[in-house]
Amino acid sequence: MLTPVPPAPEQVKTWDEALTLVRQRSTDLRFAEAGVTRAQGRWRQSLSALLPNARATAGLGVDVLNPDTPSIPGAGGGGAVVGGGAAAPGTKVPSAPLGTLSATLTQSLVDVSAWRGLSSARASETASVANLQDAQRRLTQGLANVLVATVAAERAAEINRVGLRQALERAALTQRSFELGAGTQLDVVRVGQDVALARQSLVAGDEQLRQTRESLGLSLGTDHGVGVTPDFNLTGLVEQTRRDCAPVQELGERADLVAARANVEAARESRRQASAGYLPTLGLSSTLFGFTTDPGFGRFATWNVSAVLAVPLWEGGGRAGLVRERAGVEEQAAQSLEATRRGVGVEVSRARRGVEVAEALLKTAAESLELADRTDRLTRRAFEVGRGGSLELVQSGAALRQAQLAVVLREFELVQARLDAFLTEARCDW
């Protein structure tokens, strides 16, 4: 059991390497980027309602019952004949079968609802971009935390092996004292119990190491555990993250708050769009119609330009229901903004306070380790000369192992606290 855990099949050497893997493989990042694409597509759809729309239609029609009679394609009844009466010699007449071509151009002139929809789509796009930035910040923070946890687990597993080795040395010392008649069977049992506890800690620490490697692998986009090299620079991790992220000037500029405010604006404009559906719209329409002739290729028969005024009268209450629905969406977005604002305030204050707490805990843990080490050395010396018992020896050894682990964990907690304090008030743009 003193043999170290085998290294992971894949290891990262630097922060830049880990961040590059996240950029390439992260599903959360791809999801946020897809959200931006969707928002951009929605904005373009909303804009299309305000831009000119052109359509060309071509057809070929044959009257099966009267194949020599020209018929407009798609007309109902017994066939719609183009023109009528006898044609003068040399005059171009509709051909049979009849080919037609029509081109229609429409342009919206006054449509308040469409403009509101465009504003809502623009706000949604702003929210999606902010969500992408917030995803980048959270991925950076999550990657940094899991790297710290992995390095801490590696170090804790190493300390557990040192603790087991020390417990075995105490067990050998106690066994030797018992064989020489200076100890009792109770001393041997007590020290053996301490060895068993040390083995339990080692097994639990090794499993924690494997789980943190798996967590790091998931963060890096793999389905297997990923470790870190022994020379991984953890002390400069805060400085390295500052290259990819910058602190915000005001807390309200944090990406998740920007996204929440933009969602409220999008919901408000969407409600206004529904309300504007009660207003009339004014548009311009132009249609050019032509058909094939005999003799000749064909001719254009009509070209009309018309203004279209559409006044909504009654649609069965669907518009009122749509307004109420979007009013509820707006209220939900407003409450979500307030909840996000409160959560961010608590998160930031907790992160700021966490650095001071971590520093204080590390200081007390270092003092406890120094005292535990002195106590263990004095206890072993007293036991060797026959002035101490096995109970004190076991207790001092267990206290030393706990103090060593506590110092290691407090050191990594301080690094993690500094990372959280910076990244909770930062903007990350990859």
Image (cartoon, rainbow, N blue to C red):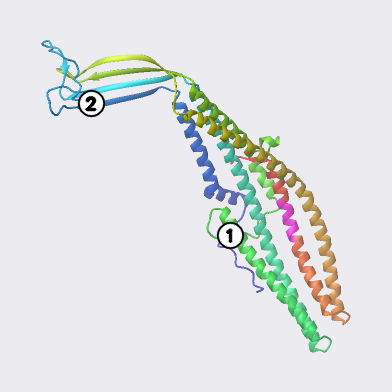
- Is 7 contained in the magenta span? no
Amino acid tagged 2: Gly
Q: Main secondary structure of the magenta part?
A: helix
Circle 1 SS class: helix
Q: Which residue is mark 2?
A: 76
Q: Is residue 412 magenta?
A: yes
Kindly check if marks 2 and 1 are in contact, taking CB atoms under 8 A apart as contact: no
Indicate the quadrant containing the N terminus: top left, top right, bottom left or bottom right: bottom right
Give the residue furthest to the right. Answer: 387
Work out whether residue 231 can be spotted: no
Where 368 sits versus 242, above or below? below
x 82%, y 58%: residue: 364
Q: Nearer the viewer, residue 256 or 9?
A: 256
Does residue 98 appear left or right of residue 218 in this picture?
left
Crowd rating for badge 2 (residues with CA inside 10 Å; few <14, some 14–19, many 20+):
few
* Residue at 57%, 57% in the rendered image: 217
- Outermost residue, left side: 89
Quadrant assignment for the C terminus:
top right
426 vs 107, nearest the viewer: 107
Residue 404: x and y, percent? 76, 65
Query: Along the horizontal axis of the image, is 137 left or right of 81?
Result: right
- Magenta segment boundaries in residue numbering: 408-416
Quarter of the image for residue 401 reads: bottom right
> Is 72 drawn above or below residue 414 in the view shown?
above
Q: Nearer the viewer, residue 142 or 262?
A: 262
The residue indicated by pointer 1 is 214
Three-letter amino acid code of the residue under disc 1: Glu
Q: Give the label on residue 398, or none.
A: none
- Vertical relation: 430 (above or below) 167: above
